[in-house]
Amino acid sequence: MSEEVVAVKIENALKTFGGNNGGMFGMFSRRNGNGGAPSGGKVAVGGVSLEINRGEIFGVLGPNGSGKSTLIRLIATLLIPDGGRITVFGHDVIENSRAVQTLINRVSVEASFFKKLSPMENLMYGARLYGVPAAETRQRVVEILTRLGLERDSIYKPMEEMSRGMQQKVAIARSLLSKPMLLLLDEPTTGLDPRSKREVQAFVRELRAAHGTTILLTTHDMHEAEALCDRVAIIDGGRIVALDTPEALKTLISANGHAPTLEDVFLELTGRQLVTEEDEES
Amino acid sequence: MSTAVNELKASYAFIERNYNIVKRYWAWELVWLVYTVANSLAVSYIGLGVEKMGGGGVDGKYLVLYLAIGTIVWRYLSVIFYWVTDLVGLERWEGTIEYTLMAPITRFFHMLGQTAFAVVYSLIHTAVVLVATMALFDISLAHANLWGFALLLVAGSLSFIGISIVGSVLPLLFPERGSQMTHLIIAMLLLVSGVYYPVDVLPDWLQAFAKFSPATYVIDGAREALLNGAPTLSLWPYVWPTLIMGVIAIPVGLRIFHWAERYAKRTGKLHRNG
């Protein structure tokens, strides 16, 4: 597969936390990624390899602590991998992080904002960092947020007066203002009510249809993964245990008397993996 | 070139954001301003107090001005320090640090926006303190060299920006207590820089440290300019050391910040909110 059609290429990515990082003096280490994992740490991402195609909606499913968010942070240039290589549209996330940053944006599970500022003020700040002109931002903020169901008045009131769900919609709007070619959605609908979830999911589909945006989505919601994703990777203990289309994944297991769901597949694969690791430890 | 222009425009994001924060926290800003003025006046009153306690041998008016200049210059420099070190601390508090650090803007232009706001904010604070002090103590600056004073503040800003960038590394490396640790730097500078007393009352070993504090030169020079009306050219011995410190401290600070950011990204310290 050529670099042109591959949006994200992850080759044997490794990330370990804790262990011997050299303490404070580790700051002056010349190691700049790919220098191997610190000894004695906890493996968050253990040799993950995958490719995400341009324009694809790719899902990553995994239990808590399975390495989903770490994987997103590695792609987002917020973490430096201990090993392996990650490229975004051909740009290496370590060697050419600035080029990667211009192409991506991210929504995390925590909607993090300056709470006293309004959505407009917060989004103006975010958009300016990506070089989006102020007039365009003012117009698009209103368009996107009203499309996501926010009332016009609330766009100019402090974020602290908004519900968690509304804040998450503002977070989604923030990520869209820079028109990213790759959108990293880390559990974007967690905490949203069913109607809001559907609004966000419809918006994600529209985004891909209208702009061809590549989307990497992590979620706990199996229905969401099935409804949105072209392909899904199931990750557990920092390793991919299955990767295919939702339909193909369902053929991996046999259910007792009913057609297997993605949730059955998830429970079967992650459960077995956990047992295997425990067995190995014992 | 166009990249630099784009990043320069992007650096305005920090100025506008900080302005909006100040605007939204206007009540707190008012409290802080009143506190600053009251604190500065209280220190300046020590001059009149010493005159009264010491009999006729002490020129209270001179002492008031001596203390007021130290206080005003120190307020100016320390407010810059706190705004620049808050570069990371504020974002740790709000949880926005990952969003800012993954944006396509170099740390140089990031700092430029933050420091430009810090300097303007600090100038406004300093002007209010100066006017209040002049009004209450009936001080005349008719014979003072105000341009020389301004030159010293500009030179002092550069070196303090460099020191502040180094200080901003602490909240990056120590998510829980990094912001509080920056107080150590400012307290040490206050001790050795002759803000409220001549440096030569300090023990020799502390006087050695004073030579490396840009505030020492700015405050001494400011006293020459405002108390004695020294011409601008004669202030050069106070200006060049702070300029040199600034020229060294800013790139060194940026380099240390780069190392610290890389370390935080290697160890996952960006994510933890203090």
Image: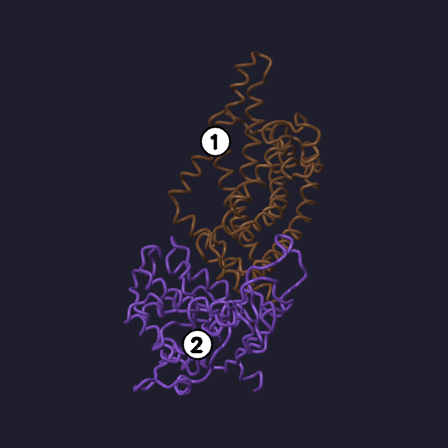
Q: CA distance from mark 1 to mark 2?
A: 66 Å
Within 10 angstroms of label 1, few (less than 14), some, or many (20 or more) residues? Answer: few
Measured as percent of width and height from the top left, residue B189 is found at 61, 37
Colour chosen for chain B: brown
The secondary element bearing badge 2 is classed as helix
Let me know if marks 1 and 2 both belong to one chain. Answer: no
Reading the image, the residue beneath label 2 is A272
Dot 2 amino acid type: Arg
From what the image shows, is residue B242 above or below residue A23? Answer: above
Return the residue nearer the eye: B146 or A130: A130
Reading the image, the residue beneath label 1 is B39
Discs 1/2, front = 2
Within 10 angstroms of label 2, few (less than 14), some, or many (20 or more) residues? Answer: few
The furthest residue to the top: B55
Q: Which chain is purple?
A: A
From what the image shows, is residue B65 above or below residue A70? Answer: above
Q: Quadrant of the N terminus of chain A?
A: bottom right
- Number of numbered discs on residues: 2
Q: Disc 2 sits on a residue from what chain? A: A
Measured as percent of width and height from the top left, residue A273 is found at 46, 75
From what the image shows, is residue B91 above or below residue A66? Answer: above
Q: Quadrant of residue A165?
A: bottom left
The furthest residue to the front: A282
Horizontal side of B87 relative to B151 (left or right) equals left
The secondary element bearing badge 1 is classed as helix
From what the image shows, is residue A90 above or below residue A20? Answer: below
Identify the residue at image location x=66%, y=31%: B230
Return the residue nearer the eye: A253 or A248: A253
Horizontal side of B235 relative to A109 (left or right) equals right
**Badge number at residue B70:** none
Dot 1 amino acid type: Asn
Return the residue nearer the eye: A26 or A263: A263
